[in-house]
Amino acid sequence: MKNWLRKLTPPRSASGASPQGGRHQRPGGAGSAVALEETPPVGAAHHAEQVLRRLEWKVIKRLDGLLQGDYRTLLRGTGLDLADLREYQLHDDVRHIDWNVTARMQSPHVRVFTEDREMSAWFLLDLSPSIDFGSGELRKRNVSAEFVTVLARLLTRHGNRVGAMLYGSGVDTVIPTRSGRRHVLHLLHSMLDRAASTENGPTRLHELLASAGSLIKRRSTVFVVSDFISEPGWEKPLAQLAQRHEVVAVRVLDPLELELPDLGLLTLRDAETGEQLVVDTHDAGFRKRFARIAAQREAELREALVKSNVDALELSTDADLVDAIVRFVDMRKRRTQLSAGGMPAHLRRAA
């Protein structure tokens, strides 16, 4: 049961892949390759441009209306700017008290800061074979590519820089941080172009996280975009990465990974090893065991993310991307407000 629960995918090719050709050279050293921003073939560039335009019209324009005034609560830069001084109020952070002003004014005053908008963001992209799975119109790879494109476009419009590390059968491509729409197209094309080039093999997510820890020197916001179906051992490097950077775990999933419907006999294939298994989904006992094991894995995954002290965002292939991002922004806003209110650390984590 572990084999087909670990990596299930029907035997079909990934949708949305760009035509062959124009791939970057990928030296064998893990985390050592740097992808140069080359001009992709005309067909591939046209496809990436079409995807970006669709997302700009259908997703980013909706987010512009929903996230007005919330940009600072979504992501913060690497520093703080002093904006004002005011009298101390209940629940203000005592660490922000300006003692010199307090002594002169004979009443407590606190410093008011605004976050520096300029920041660097990195996308750690798990493009292993299990990402090609999808029970509906979209596959996990499509959802991952759309999320990365939308976030990268939102960030680069404000002058921020985004980069990416791509993991297939290993960490073999690094896209340096840059800004601009053309760079977002380059990032999107790299993701789509990788759809047909990933080799089978077990996913070792800890290699991606460890490589990021050694490569990313400046404090950044790091998005780990993965289905987190991997060999064990990724929890420790994730926690170490979160000690230095602001880390967001973006978990991509499909409803069929949580519960199997009654579809009779099915042939399931392990995307990493190619192993096939015939199961009888008409058996109610089998479906219950599957759901129980899946629920146990979900609980263990969420617990590992909480222990690693990272924020988590779930993206499902049957859910609306805009709704997921808005929920995430609201959660970040509440946590920022609670943190500014000087709540104890254990209560902030619980919130």
Image: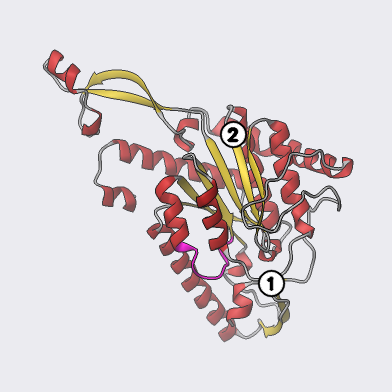
Placement of 86 over or under 257, stated as above or below: above
Measured as percent of width and height from the top left, residue 196 is found at 79, 59
Q: Where residue 236 sits: x, y (%)?
A: 43, 62
Q: Which mark is residue 161?
A: 2
The residue at 79%/67% (across/down) is 12
The first of marks 2 and 1 along the sequence is 2
Does residue 328 appear left or right of residue 123 in this picture? left
Q: Nearer the viewer, residue 206 or 297?
A: 206
Residue 284 is one of the magenta-drawn residues = no
Say above or below: 28 vs 54.
below
With respect to residue 314, does 7 lie above or below? below
Query: Between marks 2 and 1, how big is the CA–CA gap?
Result: 33 Å
Amino acid bearing label 2: Arg
For the residue labelled by badge 2, is the local secondary structure a helix, a strand or a loop?
A: strand
From this viewpoint, which residue is outermost toward the right?
A: 42
For disc 2, the neighbor class at 10 Å (few under 14, some 14 to 19, many from 20) is many
Q: Position of residue 327 (x, y in %)?
A: 50, 45
Residue in the picture at 79% in, 38% down: 49
For mark 1, what is the residue? 272
Vertically, is 64 above or below 13? above
Residue 155 shows up from this direction? yes
Q: Residues within 10 Å of mark 1 (few under 14, many from 20)?
A: many
Kindly identify the residue that appears in the image at 62 percent across and 46 percent down: 164
Q: Is residue 6 left or right of residue 133?
A: left
Q: Image quarter for residue 335?
A: top left
**Boundaries of the magenta span:** 227-235
Q: Secondary structure at mark 1?
A: loop
Indicate whether residue 229 is drawn in magenta.
yes
Residue 259: which numbered mark, if any? none
